[in-house]
Image: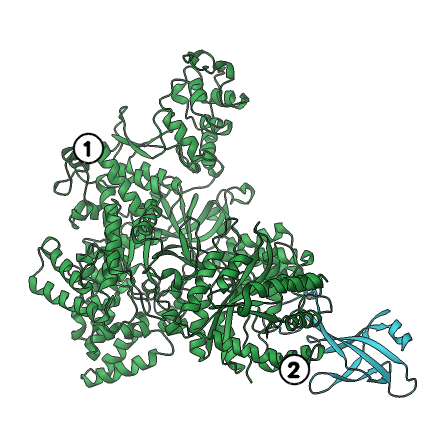
Chain colours: A cyan, B green
Amino acid sequence: MGMFTESIEVARAANGMPLRVKWQGRDYRLVAEPQRWFERRKWWDENLRIPRGIGAGLADYEMWRLQLVAVSGSKQEHTFDVSFDAQTERWRLVRVHQELAQSA
Amino acid sequence: MSFTHLNVSSSYSAHYGVSHPRTLAQAAKAQGAPMLALTDRDGLYGTVKHVAACMTEGIAPILGVNLAVLDDNGATLGRIVLLAQGHSNGLGYAALCRAISLAHNTAHGVPGLSANQLDQLSKSGNLMLLLGGESDVARAILKGNYAKARGLLVEWKKRVGKMLRVEITTHLSAPGSRHSLGEASRLLRYAYERQIKAVLSNAVRYVDPDGAVTADILDSARALHSLKNLDFCQPNGQGWLKTPHEMFQLATEIGQATERSWAHQMLRETEAVAHWAAIDPVTDLGWKSPVIPEARVIGLYRPAMQELTDRVYGAVPTLLRNEAPNVVEERLALELGVIERLDFAGYFLTVAETVNLITEMGVRVAARGSGASSLVNYLLGISQVNPLAHDLVFERFLSDTRTTLPDIDIDVESARRHEIYHKIFSSFGEERVSLMSMQNAYRARGAVRDAGAALGVEQEQVDEIAKQLWRFSASSFREALVEKPELAALAQRITDDTQLDILIDATERLDRLPRHISMHPCGVILSDASLLDRTPVQPSGIGLQMSQFDKHDMDLMGLIKLDVLGVRMQSAIAYTLEEIARMHPSKEQASRAGGHTNDSYIDASGAIDLAKVPLDDEPTFDLIRSTHTLGCFQIESPGQRELVGKLAPREFNDLIIDISLFRPGPMQSNMVKPYLEHRHGFAPAQYLHPDLIPALAETHGVTVFHEQVLRMLDVLTGCGLGMADVYRRLLGNPEKEPAVERYVRTEATKRGYSQETIDQVWEVLSGFGSFGFCKAHGAAFAVPTYHSAWLKAHHPEAFLAGIWEHDPGMYPKRLLVSEARRMGVPILPLDINRSNGHYRVERVFEYAPAKVPMVPRAVGSQRPGRYGIRLAFRDIHQMSEREVQRLVTGQPYEHLADVRARAGLSRRTYQNLAALGVFDSLLAGTSRADTIAHTQSMVHSSLPAKYRPGPGQLALDLGQIEHIKATGTQLDPAEVVRTELDLMHLDASEHLMTSYRRRLSHLPITQAAELLHLRNGTEVLVAGVRIATQTPPMRGGKRVVFISVDDGTGCIDATFFDDTQQRTGPLLFSTRMLLIHGVTRRTGPRGISLQALNAWDLHQSESLPVAGYLEEQGRPQISYRPKFGEGARKSESVGELAKRMEAEGLDQRGA
């Protein structure tokens, strides 16, 4: 399993569920129901300020596990863990699951 | 379909919940929820706030509690939630209260219930048990012990049966962690296996996502670990009051992970439980209907009103001999009429019964507050003030317009307060009485400490910051950093250190959150035998049970509260009277000692009945006018001494006015100056309208008392005094005042008052309504003020002993040594055979005629120097009460070995006593220094075994065995003072300042005693020990700091304005020994104070000014002198000031 943290583009449906992903210039679509959870965030290490009213996304960030295939080209399945930071409103690619990718 | 949150913790779950019940209720309402539960941890601390908030929002409250489940050793197995059944005529709520009281009655101090107790409690069918994410079942699932989890669930079902619900919560945390979707799904599956109904919750800790960070900090504070090392914190930040839509979505996700239909069933069951538990505040809680003790408990065998009427009329002949019968008759008809219509007779009899209990114990007792306005209270013996004599208005206390019980506050001797509580409990019965609690909230200091610990900021750094936080709330921390000069250095550091920046954010988040409850200092709840069905109780620090409700909850819950307030001055007065009778044990002796011309108030044993002492004693007013009022109740502060000097009281009513004027409102709104000018005849009194003369004549046209506001409103509108008090309470309330103004203007116009008069009167009313003072309160206070001054004038030694013994005042004990010198009262040193555990008056035989003391004494009373005060063994550093007892029991002692043999002192105490010269009178030929050296060399404080008498043996003559080497060494006086300060916190042998004089010898230092002879505007340098620091709020928002120092010849009061504060920086609050450069300001014939220009720390010799400082060109000059009159008015209107005072808790309306 490889560890990344790089920028990734994710488009969501109205209910918040990811629909499409663009990564390293390629478009991917989902092939299975994605899984979501909220991961603990160590704000005391990461933040310089925690004023009242700063809002959501300080104590956790949203994680999605996505099973994807590229829209064009190889039909190989990839499993990505991506995170969404509510404070910066940015998506990051956190990890790519190699074993799953190979077994697919 | 709706969704109801059944598991919600508010900020009243100390160190756990984040949001106030009101915030939660408002949010629930905004989300469209018809109901909302509050299930705080360990108690109903926030329940009444919750119910009130729900009623305001129009949603139904649900009540419950989150409790630990304990094993036999008191270890926590998990936590569950209990919900009370609603609409059950209080049965569900009563069961909840009893369950919580039971949970707090554990032997090991950890609140919680055993599984067996829960089994019993569920039998009644009034309590629903929710088994959720904190339960032992969920814990087992989290650890992967699935079989154990299933087994536990079976046991719960067996125990609780149909009152059991499984509570499903998911915070969508990472797989495998607490509140994960997997855990929730598994728990739901197990519930279905066992056919246990399930409900959905979000285990709410904060109203919105922003609160998650605060919850983390609270977790850290609770666990006493920094966030880095915290292993049991929330898995993420999802525990907020989610909307119904969000909750439905969670249900859907759980349904997808299990069975789709289960999600619907779970949501339906949640609403079913919510309906079952919805509370009707009136029928379930007895909302707002007061419950008094049963008639027979207060000795009542006929209707309360009849009993009350008879008792009141029965007391008239003895207490009101000199009042005109028709006046008394009219007043009693008014008061008894109101009491009858409100059905409060039982309440008055209850209070009377309590006061009677206290009086029978021989304890001094006095009513304070508006209760003194009532003639009924006076005749029942509750109050010592005759309201007819002082023209007090009953309606300020009670009228037909009032629906809640009036507060009657009772002052008792502080030293006997706990004894009184025990007596009340045993007389009324444990099931009817409880102490009241109070919530202690985070303030700046505590908040910065806990926030610092959470963030792992170095302890030293946090302590240093905490020390600087003085008198402002954490929420204004950032503002204070900018404004306060003493924080300038800290502000700079914060710019440099990012860790401090986040520390301040964290501190602000904790500010005002409840931390823990404690015993309220004076509230006692009295009720009937149903009390424990209506409030949960827990043990207090003094063993008596304490309600979980605070003073704001009382009226709403129909609980009657008495304020039985321990007042040290009452103890000091009681002690003074005992000392007088002990030293002068007959009518003649006591009369002679005090120079009393009238001895009708002294009995045959020398005991003085202060209640019979006339209130017009000339020597007493001489003393007060001299401003040597240190130790006198209410009039000893620097500001009061200044005011007393200007006002020069001549009669008792002047004292009432003085006390009422010395409040933030009158002082700042410039009421004092016109009053004084009119009083002394410098300017004619001005009245806004001739009709107002009767109301305002006693204060020369200046509005001082609430009573005057009532009369003005009544004159203007004819509304009656009762309604006038209702309007008065609305003055200053931004929402309600406009309606009052409209009413007043309309009615006054109808009654023919000119527009101009109405405008002027309204300005006075709206401005002063909020900070006028209740005259009855002033009158009640003026009684101990007068009594203490009377005792100081007639029996100064006994009075000083009383003050010393009970320490009632604002000043440290060491200042009383200086006062004793000014009073011509010798301080007799600690002595092994003459001192005991108390400060006692002692005859001085080696009488040396003292010079005329500065503090005046009553003519004919004992001459100064004949009696002194012997220092006591109490208050000696590290000497325990038991050591004092043993030492005193063994008196007298013949020699040092005798002390060692019999007193049983620890080595340290023995050495300390030697250092203080306690053994000096046992010494022959050796000095104190020798004794100290001797005790330092001892290994044990008791005698070696060979010298101790065996059984049946006579004691040896021990005189021979202690060999103290005489070296001729003498102690340096400065060292003696140092020791006294270290061990007794006072400088008895000479003044602390004496040793500093040397290092100031190059400067022209002015002494306090010389100040009074200086002209206004003289530039001086003064030095002394800080004795008081005050920072009252000021008009225009600029802070002024008052610092009083004592230099041994008297007190010097210095005022530090903004520019001087900038100059002095941090030493303003932290330095003990001060050198102050200032300019004299004459405040009255007997008053002078300083306007400070600069100050230095005497300990920092290198920073002290050099010789010739007062001639230096560059020294600070007076550049700024705030005008308290017209100039300031522009920057802050009276209305604005009133608002600020309310915000700062200085509003006196309720007093």
Toward which corner of the image does residue B208 lie, by quadrant? Answer: bottom right
Kind of element beneath mark 1 = loop
Circle 1 Cα neighbour tier, 10 Å, few/some/many (<14 / 14–19 / ≥20): some
Q: Is residue B892 above or below residue B300?
A: above
Q: Amino acid at mark 1?
A: Pro
Q: Position of residue B202 (x, y in %)?
A: 60, 72
Q: Position of residue B1135 (x, y in %)?
A: 36, 73
What residue lies at 55% left-to-right and 45% top-to-bottom? B1103
Q: Is residue B547 above or below residue A59?
A: above
What residue lies at 52% left-to-right and 60% top-to-bottom? B118
Which of the two marks, 1 or 2, is nearer to us in this view? Answer: 2
Which residue has dot 2 on it? B261
Q: Number of numbered discs present?
A: 2
Q: Position of residue B390 (x, y in %)?
A: 18, 60
Q: Amino acid at mark 2?
A: Ser
Question: Could you tell me if residue B795 is visible in this image?
Answer: yes
Subunit that carries the residue with mark 2: B
Which residue has dot 1 on it? B585
Subunit that carries the residue with mark 1: B
Gap between marks 1 and 2 measured at Cα: 90 Å
What residue lies at 23% left-to-right and 59% top-to-bottom? B349
Q: Is residue B14 left or right of residue B854?
A: right
**Where, quadrant-wise, is the C terminus of chain B in this rendering?**
bottom left
**Where, quadrant-wise, is the N terminus of chain B in this rendering?**
bottom right
